[in-house]
């Protein structure tokens, strides 16, 4: 079994991926804020996972797992020391001082890089034949941070598992609320893809004994040959996450989806249509019924809605990316749908789409 050194930029959601990789004996370094560095290095990562058939979640302590976890600041690591870099921060954070320079060092190192952002990095979208990526640069907080990446060295992993930092808990604690799988597209390189498949196998084989005998844990890593599989998340984001933003404040994802199921299906199908026009097969995507069923367990507002309510000046704008005119001609059905569920601060006004300014 090969032991890999993995650098993860981001320690909140990133600690979930880190903990899963520790089962394979891998060495993980998470780049995070000073207070997080201290917490993770002193007390490890604590990840709480719901287990089917058990009343209470189990808590994984990274210090008791086979691999080794450390945390560091952005100026304390060199990407060339790692076999894989994972991007687990929100898209606007990559323009921050220190983080921006590290991201550029990752790009120049040509170390394989896997994003677990909702917002796909711009170089990844360049792997889609015929997509006019220059036209979608305005969807990014600062598209120039991606300039030095080689598209073939970067892949996308759909962050389908849902997790939060529980209010009132220490910053090294993560609570998984929806224990679904990470779905990652292959790299251009067979060698880099083989590394992902080894990690996939490590996580699949992992067992944990919470008392009473070893059990299999949820949240797997699934490697796919299609580069469109991670884009299945787009329909979920526009149907649920962004429609949590209403004129009356943030609502739960469950309510955003189920308050008007007809509208939700309309939005979802529209976005799936966009993905198929880009080259996705229906088999790459998730049926609306499966997503709607999962949304019943999403009883909190999305991170985008929470961030806006807390006054964040920038959030990930996957909604804007999807609506951009490079996939254009499909705007009006989404406008009609959004008008009834009203992510009114997120979806473009009709006049912007009609004038070509989206």
Image (cartoon, helix red, strand yellow):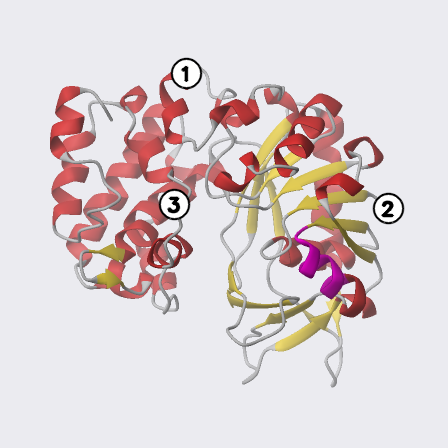
Query: Dot 3: few (<14), some (14–19), or many (≥20) neighbours within 10 Å?
Result: few
Determine whether label 1 and label 3 are within 8 Å by CB. no
Of label 1 and label 2, which has the lower sequence position?
2
Determine whether label 1 and label 2 are within 8 Å by CB. no
Q: Which residue is mark 3?
A: 313
Q: Which residue is mark 1?
A: 134
Determine whether label 2 and label 3 are within 8 Å by CB. no
Q: What percent of the width, then of the height, locates residue 289?
A: 31, 56
Q: Residue at x 63, y 58 (%)?
A: 16
Q: Residue at x 17, y 46 (%)?
A: 338
Q: Which residues are magenta?
A: 32-40
Q: What percent of the width, then of the height, locates residue 28?
A: 78, 50
Q: Residue at x 54, y 76 (%)?
A: 168
Q: CA distance from mark 2 to mark 3?
A: 40 Å
Q: Magenta span has 23? A: no
Q: Residue at x 81, y 67 (%)?
A: 63
- Quadrant of the snapshot with the C terminus: top left
Q: Which residue is mark 2?
A: 3
Query: Dot 2: few (<14), some (14–19), or many (≥20) neighbours within 10 Å?
Result: few
The image quadrant of residue 255 is bottom left
């Amino acid at each position: 079994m090969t032991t890999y050194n993995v650098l993860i930029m981001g320690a909140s959601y990133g600690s979930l991926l880190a903990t899963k990789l520790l089962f394979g004996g891998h060495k993980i370094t998470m780049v995070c804020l000073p207070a997080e560095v201290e917490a993770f290095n002193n007390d490890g990562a604590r990840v709480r996972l719901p287990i089917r058939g058990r009343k209470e979640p189990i808590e994984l302590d990274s210090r008791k797992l086979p691999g080794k976890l450390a945390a560091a600041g952005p100026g304390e690591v060199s990407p060339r020391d790692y076999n894989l870099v994972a991007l687990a921060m929100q898209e606007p954070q990559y323009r921050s001082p220190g983080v921006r320079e590290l991201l550029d060092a990752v790009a120049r190192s040509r170390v394989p890089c896997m994003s677990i952002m909702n917002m796909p990095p711009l170089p990844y979208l360049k792997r889609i034949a015929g997509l006019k990526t220059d036209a979608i640069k305005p969807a990014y907080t600062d598209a120039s941070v991606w300039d030095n990446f080689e598209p073939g060295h970067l892949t996308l992993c759909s962050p389908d598992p849902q997790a939060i930092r529980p209010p009132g808990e220490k910053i090294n604690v993560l609570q998984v609320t929806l224990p679904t799988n990470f779905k990652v597209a292959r790299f251009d390189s067979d060698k880099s893809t083989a590394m992902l498949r080894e990690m996939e196998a490590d996580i699949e084989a992992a067992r944990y004994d919470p008392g009473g005998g070893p059990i299999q844990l949820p949240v797997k890593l699934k490697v796919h040959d299609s580069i469109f599989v991670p884009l299945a998340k787009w329909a979920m984001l526009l149907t649920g996450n962004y429609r949590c933003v209403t004129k009356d404040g943030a609502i739960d994802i469950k309510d955003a989806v189920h308050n008007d199921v007809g509208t939700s299906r309309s939005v979802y199908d529209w976005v799936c249509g966009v993905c198929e026009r880009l080259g996705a097969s229906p088999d790459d995507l998730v049926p609306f019924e499966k997503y709607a069923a999962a949304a019943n367990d999403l009883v909190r507002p999305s991170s985008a809605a929470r961030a806006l309510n807390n006054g964040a000046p920038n959030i990930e704008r996957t909604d804007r990316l999807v609506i951009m005119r490079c996939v254009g001609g499909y705007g009006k059905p989404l406008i009609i749908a959004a008008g009834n569920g009203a992510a009114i601060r997120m979806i473009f006004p009709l006049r912007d789409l009609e004038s070509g300014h989206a």
